[in-house]
Structure formats: structure tokens, C-alpha cells
Amino acid sequence: MKAIAALLLALSLIACGGKSPPPTPQASAAATTGDTDALPADGAFIGKVWIATTSGHALGEMLVFLPDRSLLMDSCFETYRISGWGVAGTNIRWLEDSIPIEASVSLPSAEELSLHIIGQERAKTYVSASVPYVCPDMPK
């Protein structure tokens, strides 16, 4: 029995240890081009830390849309959340507490982001975070 277990372990390690061949240049270029062409605002909002400027929202609310389609949401006084995001036509979408959120994206400038969430009257506005960024003091 021990010999069979050792053999299975060895075969598993050998099977997992090999390198996979690199993707062909044509496949990589096609995948990259297809993803960026489909992104609202040409994907210029991806990979930046966005700090909310909309009044009435949590202090230091931030969003980071990552290239791997993960969305990091946080604020200075709330627990962070990581969810997936994707493209829906000309909009983006993500889930918050299992509720689908869809928004149109606009970039008034390279340092400003506006998300108009479908079903809400007012857009949420953000600015690109400067480094270093420190959370504001909590109001008393």
C-alpha cells in the first residue's frame, strides 16, 4: 500500500513539474487585442487606485480594477472586498453581496473616473490616488 502511495506521489510530482510551452505570439496578441478593444474607456481605468470624491460615501473609499479582472474595494473605515469584474457591452459589472452592479465608465481626464451605476441618478466620482496616500481622520 505504501509503495502504491509513493508511486502515485512521484507520478503526480513528475506530471506537475514540467514547464508548459509558451503561448504562440499570435494567440497572445489576439487575446490582448480582444480584451482591450472590448473595455470601456480603452481600459485606462485599470491598474490605478481610485479614491472617491462623491460626498456621502465612506471616507477614503477606494477602488482598484486589476488586469486579472479582480476588483479591490476598500475604505479607511470598512472591511475590504475583492470580487470579480467584467464587461457588459459598453459597461462594466461586478457583484456586491451577490447583487449585480453595472455601471458606465467615463474618464473626464487621466486622473478622474466617473462611474454611473445603472438605476442611480448620480454618478460616483473618483480621482487617481497620489502616493503616498493616508486615510483621513474619522469625523468626531
Image (tube, rainbow, N blue to C red):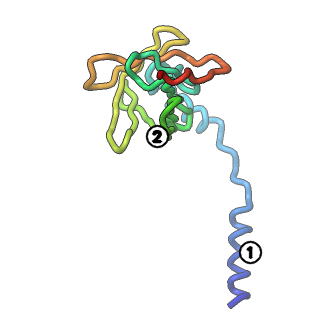
Please report whichever mark, 1 or 2, sits nearer to the chain's N-terminal start.
1
Quadrant for residue 1, please give it: bottom right
The residue under label 2 is: 84
Quadrant for residue 11, please give it: bottom right
Q: Is residue 95 left or right of residue 139?
A: left
Across and down, in percent, residue 62 comes to: 51, 26
Across and down, in percent, residue 51 comes to: 52, 21
Across and down, in percent, residue 25 comes to: 65, 36
Q: Is residue 103 left or right of residue 77?
A: left
Q: In front: mark 1 or mark 2?
A: 2
Up/down of 15 relative to 8, above or below: above
Q: Secondary structure at mark 2?
A: strand
Up/down of 12 relative to 76, above or below: below
Across and down, in percent, residue 124 comes to: 39, 19
Q: Secondary structure at mark 1?
A: helix
Q: Residue at x 53, y 20 (%)?
A: 44
Kindly identify which numbered label has been placed on residue 122: none
- Which amino acid does the dot numbered 1 rest on? Ala
- Which amino acid does the dot numbered 2 rest on? Gly
Q: Is residue 8 left or right of residue 113?
A: right
Kindly identify which numbered label has been placed on residue 10: 1
Closer to the camera in the image, 30 or 11:
11
Up/down of 36 relative to 54, above or below: below
Q: Residue at x 49, y 39 (%)?
A: 79
In this view, which residue lies farthest toward the top?
A: 109
Q: Residue at x 55, y 22 (%)?
A: 137
Closer to the camera in the image, 38 or 102:
102
Question: In 3D space, how far apart are the residues under numbered discs 1 and 2 (Cα atoms)?
Answer: 36 Å
Q: Is residue 125 left or right of residue 48?
A: left
Closer to the camera in the image, 49 or 61:
61
Q: Residue at x 52, y 35 (%)?
A: 72
